[in-house]
Amino acid sequence: MNADDARLLRALLSTRPVGSLATLHGGEPAVSMVPFVLPRGDTRLFIHVSALAPHTRDIRAHPRASLLVMAEPGNGVSPQALPRVALQADASFLPRDGEDHAAARDAYLARFPDAATTFELGDFSLVALRPVSARLVAGFGRAHALVGDGLAAWLRG
């Protein structure tokens, strides 16, 4: 992957506020929208989810999930050429008293300050999505499969 495509990957994950979260729901695929944050220097993305949401129950039952993040449509770009990244990730719930929770909470609230009230509710949890592979489409004919240490390096920036 060249430097321009690497910058595009980081720009997608640092500027786009929401992604499409795919989970297994009763054995069938299900997709929902979730705000996310990728803190600088980290390889995990964090989402803040309610126990009332089906996707929360889904990732408790099957912790492998996928997150699709796309560039904003427009400027005459063909939909097939829109930059996007699909991450396959292992989900884990962060304990409120765990050492990672405070840093993840701070990063999430820095990006989504209006979410402060949901952190006061007992049914919301922070979930870390640890990517295991990714498919970056940087434009027409510019696709990259990313795994392992290479993926981690690109995510860290």
Image (cartoon, rainbow, N blue to C red):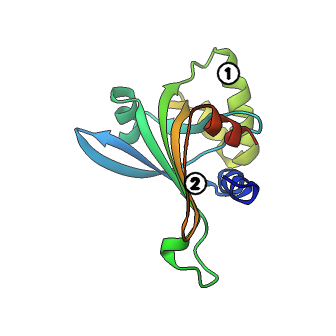
Amino acid residing under circle 1 = Asp
The dot on residue 18 is 2
Q: Position of residue 86 (x, y in %)?
A: 50, 51
Q: Residue at x 76, y 35 (%)?
A: 41
Q: Residue at x 64, y 82 (%)?
A: 75
The amino acid type found where label 2 is placed reads Val
| Nearer to us in this view, 25 or 77 | 77
Q: Earlier along the polypeptide chain: callout 2 or callout 1?
A: 2
For disc 2, the neighbor class at 10 Å (few under 14, some 14 to 19, many from 20) is some
Q: Which is nearer the eye, 114 or 67? A: 67
Towards the viewer: 94 or 142: 142
- As drawn, the label of residue 100 is 1
Above or below for 117 versus 125: below
Q: Which labelled disc corresponds to residue 46? A: none
At x 37%, y 42%, the residue is 23
Q: Is residue 94 above or below residue 14?
A: above
Vertical side of 74 occupied by 51: above or below: above
SS label for mark 1: helix
Q: Secondary structure at mark 2?
A: strand
User: In the rendering, at what x and y percent does residue 133 appear?
Assistant: 51, 39
Q: Residues within 10 Å of mark 1 (few under 14, many from 20)?
A: few
Q: How many marks?
A: 2
Q: Residue at x 74, y 60 (%)?
A: 4
In the rendered image, the residue lying farthest to the left is: 27
Q: Is residue 93 above or below residue 154?
A: above
